[in-house]
Image: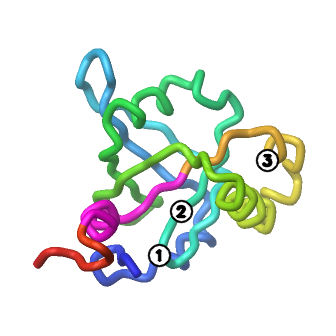
Amino acid sequence: MPDWDGEDLTGWNSKPLLHVATTGRRTGERRKKWWLVFAVLPEVIYLIEERGTRADWVRNIIAEPRVKIRVDGGEELDARARVVTEPYEAERAKGAVRGTDIGRTLADLIEWGQPVAIEPARAESARATGGTTPA
């Protein structure tokens, strides 16, 4: 299972905001966004984007999936973001977000929103090498 540089981020579920920094697809400049509604599982963080792939930040991660993430008071971590396209994973993402305190109040958004997954930066390397991460 990929990890977050040895850190267990599930404690982030108790934090009020998740900050994500993307790279602008046209400008190359750093773009910052934050979320109130997110779910942190041991191997992935799920967000729900209400504008789907029309959202600028989603277009940015499609063009350049490398992102930086942090919670208030925490250090930035390297990660990779992707739009969730598999139906099973989309339901898993929506269920995880629906299970959060704020997610329970935003059921409509969660039902029609687009799930996005954020994984450790090394997760892509692990997938490419059959589950092992190069040293």
Circle 3 Cα neighbour tier, 10 Å, few/some/many (<14 / 14–19 / ≥20)? many
In-image side of 54 versus 110 (left or right): left
| 134 or 119: nearer the viewer | 134
Disc 3 marks which amino acid?
Answer: Ile
Residue 88 lies, in percent from the top left, at 70, 60
Q: Residue at x 50, y 33 (%)?
A: 58
Residue at image mark 2? 45
Disc 1 marks which amino acid?
Answer: Leu
User: Is the C-beta separation of discs 3 and 1 under 8 Å?
Assistant: no
Residue at image mark 1? 9
Q: Which residues are magenta?
A: 117-128
| 112 or 68: nearer the viewer | 112
Q: CA distance from mark 1 to mark 2?
A: 9 Å
Residue 78 among those drawn in magenta = no
Q: Residue at x 10, y 78 (%)?
A: 135
Quarter of the view holding residue 109 = top right
Residue 45 lies, in percent from the top left, at 53, 62
Label 2 residue SS: strand
Residue 55 lies, in percent from the top left, at 57, 25
Residue at image mark 3? 110
Q: Earlier in the sequence, mark 1 or mark 2?
A: 1
* Snapshot colouring: rainbow
Report the quarter where the N terminus lies: bottom left
Disc 2 marks which amino acid?
Answer: Ile
Q: Earlier in the sequence, mark 2 or mark 3?
A: 2
In-image side of 33 versus 110 (left or right): left
In the figure, 4 relative to 22: above or below? below
